[in-house]
């Protein structure tokens, strides 16, 4: 992921949390010295976080969030920021654990639920990720979330459910404007129209079901939408080779 994007997002997250801190910090009435010390502590952590982000070092940033949470355990905004930080630097297991704690207190936090679902997918926790996307989609109706459900259903070989999800996606008005990133080996990826990706997925399912002619038609539709889309091109070649061997 682009490191500049990581830094920008982390600054956004910290800015949101710091702007909310007065709601969670104890105000007390037992003397100005306590308040002065508390403010000084927050300012110090703020400087550490800024320096950590500046030098692209998530360690001190995370420790400062932990320090703030130890002082103000009811400040859930800082816990949100910690989850976002872990997500942005690819610490998926830590993101899942923090997100799970947040969701215990606020199950309707859709942003955190999405972080958890994506992190689970990144770690290959397919069933858990599918369960979370299935909670997320009814609330968002986001076509990207629906597409993730289809891919996860395929990964679990729940082919009938996957085909139903594919048909639902193909019936959406916003499909034409949607794109997805598909990943290949060795870190390669390709941005393609979602419609093409969905046709390719349906083609692969039909290949699995030995419905080769229907599969061929799906790959053809995918290639017509994006002539440089490698997955259906390679799948079409594999299908032709299989038919030749038969």
Image (cartoon, helix red, strand yellow):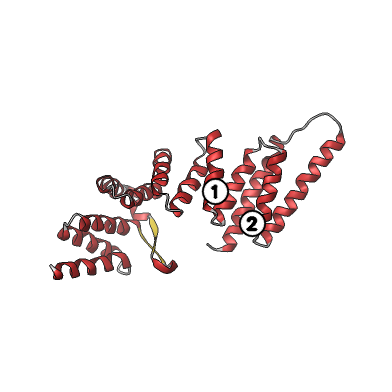
Quarter of the rendering containing residue 16: top right
- In the rendered structure, which disc, 1 or 2, sits on the residue that comes first in sequence? 2
Residue beneath label 1, please? 95
Q: Residue furthest top?
A: 29
Q: Is residue 144 above or below residue 235?
A: above
Q: Is residue 100 above or below residue 242?
A: above
Residue beneath label 2, please? 58
The residue shown at (38%, 50%) is 148
Please tell me how crowded label 1 is: few (under 14), some (14-19), or many (20+) other residues with Cα within 10 Å.
many
The residue shown at (74%, 33%) is 26
Secondary structure of residue under mark 2: helix
Quarter of the rendering containing residue 209: bottom left
Give how far across and how far down residue 239 sits, in percent. Answer: 20, 66
Q: Residue furthest left?
A: 246
Quarter of the rendering containing residue 2: bottom right
Quick check: marks 1 and 2 in contact, CB under 8 Å? no
The residue shown at (69%, 55%) is 60
């Amino acid at each position: 992921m682009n490191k500049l994007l990581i830094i920008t997002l982390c600054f956004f997250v910290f800015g949101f949390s710091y702007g909310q801190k007065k709601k969670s910090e104890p105000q007390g009435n037992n003397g100005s010295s306590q308040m002065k010390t508390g403010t000084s502590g927050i300012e110090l952590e703020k400087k550490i976080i800024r320096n950590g982000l500046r030098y692209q070092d998530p360690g001190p940033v995370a420790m400062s969030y932990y320090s703030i949470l130890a002082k103000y355990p009811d400040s859930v905004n800082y816990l949100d920021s910690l989850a976002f930080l872990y997500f942005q630097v690819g610490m998926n297991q830590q993101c899942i654990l923090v997100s799970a704690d947040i969701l215990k207190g606020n199950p309707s936090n859709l942003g955190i639920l999405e972080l958890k679902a994506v992190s689970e997918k990144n770690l290959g926790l397919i069933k858990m990720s599918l369960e979370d996307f299935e909670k997320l989609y009814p609330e968002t109706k986001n076509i990207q979330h629906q597409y993730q459900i289809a891919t996860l259903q395929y990964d679990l070989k729940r082919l009938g459910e996957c085909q139903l999800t594919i048909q639902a996606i193909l019936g959406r008005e916003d499909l034409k404007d949607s794109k997805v990133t598909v990943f290949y080996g060795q870190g390669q990826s390709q941005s393609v129209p979602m419609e093409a990706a969905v046709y390719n997925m349906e083609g692969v399912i039909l290949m699995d079901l030995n419905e080769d002619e229907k599969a061929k038609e799906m790959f053809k539709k995918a290639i017509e939408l994006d002539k440089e889309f490698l997955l259906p091109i390679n799948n079409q070649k594999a299908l032709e080779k299989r038919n030749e061997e038969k």
